[in-house]
Image (cartoon, rainbow, N blue to C red):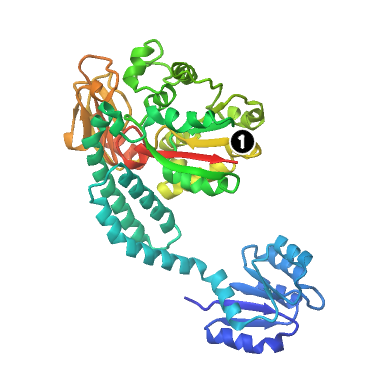
Amino acid sequence: MSKIKILWADDEIDLLKPHIIFLEQKDYEVVAVTNGYDAIEEIENNFYHIVFLDEKMPGINGLDTLVAIKKIRPELPVVMVTKIEEEPVMNEAIGSQISDYLIKPVNPKQLWLTVKKHTEQKQLVSEKITSLYQQDFRELSMTINDNLDIEGWKKLYRELVRWELELEKSNDTNLKQILDSQKSEANANFFKFISKNYQNWIKNPDSAPLMSNKLMIRKILPLAEKGRPVYTIIIDNFRYDQWKTIQPLLTDKFHLLDDDLYFSILPTATNYSRNAIFSGMMPLDIEKSYPNSWVFDEEKGSKNLNEEKFLIEYLRKLRKNISVNYQKITSLEAGRRLPDQVNNMNGNLRIIIYNFIDLLSHVRTEMEVLKELAEDEAAYRSLTFSWFKNSPLYETIEKIASEKCYLVITTDHGSIRVKRPSRVIGDKNTTTNLRFKQGKNLDFEMKEVLYFKNPADIMLPQPAISSSYIFAREDYYFIYQNNYNYFANYYENTFQHGGVSMEEMMVPIVVLEN
């Protein structure tokens, strides 16, 4: 690696010779100039990693020199070194994109630390993260293979996501691959955990974690009875790692009361999990209670037209005097109108359904350019962050932040990047979802699925007497025999939902207040 190169502009540079010698002994290369004009010329003609700039110089002062330097190299760190501590000077320097501010007389070690901070921080952070992950690796591996309970799995998943986000700051691709391997191992054991316990959770709800059908009564309705409005934003297909990515944008506007995970029911698909949220019932009970409103997968028509109706009926059964305002955003135009509409929302419970991320995952499957933009989990998170920061939804939340209220952010299910095709055979009425299948006489690889011959065992509706359900485990995805190789390649590395994985089933439920 070439030496870090420093440009130092100060009209009293001769007095700073001991400082320059100190930096050179630390193996930095220092070029000194005595005025702003020479500093600008150096930046035009040579490459520097950092600039020390005196504020008071004859001819052209430090602030004007700073503006000129930023026009040439906007990304270049510039540190103002001055005797002046006046607030207007500091404010102007900060407004002109100063990177740091040192008051004379400066200590040589202070200079050294400043150079490290602005030129070596990424490398130092990367090295520290690498060291910490290496220390945690063994403990994570032991935890993954431990006999975890519900809370243990939630804690482990949080840790894996935390390290996933931390290692994005590291340059060590090998460690990222090791973490990917640990996540895969964890998902294999999570599948065993769900296979062993899921049916019992359905039969004995007292032993179950918080699931879709209990989300409203246990997390949201108690807030609505406290007197403040409760804005509940359900972002379709929203993963826990995506929440942690956008969290900093919200926690400077709201106080974080609760950052939890709940378990989406199976299938981890909108028409099942979201209807369960609003009705407070499992899908089989919804189909029995509202036979004219439940739409089977193989039938035409929208599966989520009755959410508001289900919720109002649910509140009536609970004898809850809670008024509801319901908005569903399924188009760009509706999203653009939302920030202006939010101030006119009334009622104790104000619900906003936002479908963008689910649309993004489906469009990504179809469009090559989006596949390249979101080629892996890190890129998918980045795309989500960019969308959210510039979205009408974020603008809406900023308006909500001006009101005394609770804000709940959650989802109906998550998604997983699929990598391994699994052969399945079914009749023409078999569902088309890549992560679960419902149909008659299904033929499949038993070791690659969670199979329920009798859907009633897990409270799922049965359109035909011999209908059964299979759910893809880990990162498998279902492909029919016809054109197998083509579709296996087409869907590989796309984000899908409906099956059994930590990413699909353990999803965020966040409560904020202001």
The spot of residue 432 in percent (x, y) is 32, 26
Left or right, 411 with respect to 406, comes to left
Left or right, 512 with respect to 287, comes to right
Left or right, 413 with respect to 512, comes to left
Density class for disc 1 (Cα within 10 Å; few <14, some 14-19, many ≥20) is some
Q: Residue furthest top?
A: 292
Determine the secondary structure under disc 1: helix
Type of the residue with mark 1: Thr
* Residue located 51% across and 68% down the image: 121
| Residue 279 in view | yes
Q: Residue furthest right?
A: 59
* Residue located 39% across and 50% down the image: 161
What quarter of the picture does the C terminus occupy? top right
* Residue located 28% across and 48% down the image: 186
The spot of residue 320 in percent (x, y) is 49, 20
The number of numbered badges drawn on the structure is: 1
From this view, report whether residue 97 is shown above or below residue 406.
below
User: Toward which corner of the image does residue 393 lie, by quadrant?
Assistant: top right
From this view, report whether residue 101 is shown above or below residue 341.
below
Left or right, 356 with respect to 433, comes to right
The spot of residue 163 in percent (x, y) is 39, 55
User: Toward which corner of the image does residue 291 lie, by quadrant?
Assistant: top left
* Closer to the camera in the image, 1 or 395: 395
From this view, report whether residue 105 is shown above or below residue 379.
below
> Mark 1 sits on what residue?
396
| Residue 355 in view | no
The spot of residue 324 in percent (x, y) is 55, 22
From this view, report whether residue 333 is shown above or below residue 18.
above
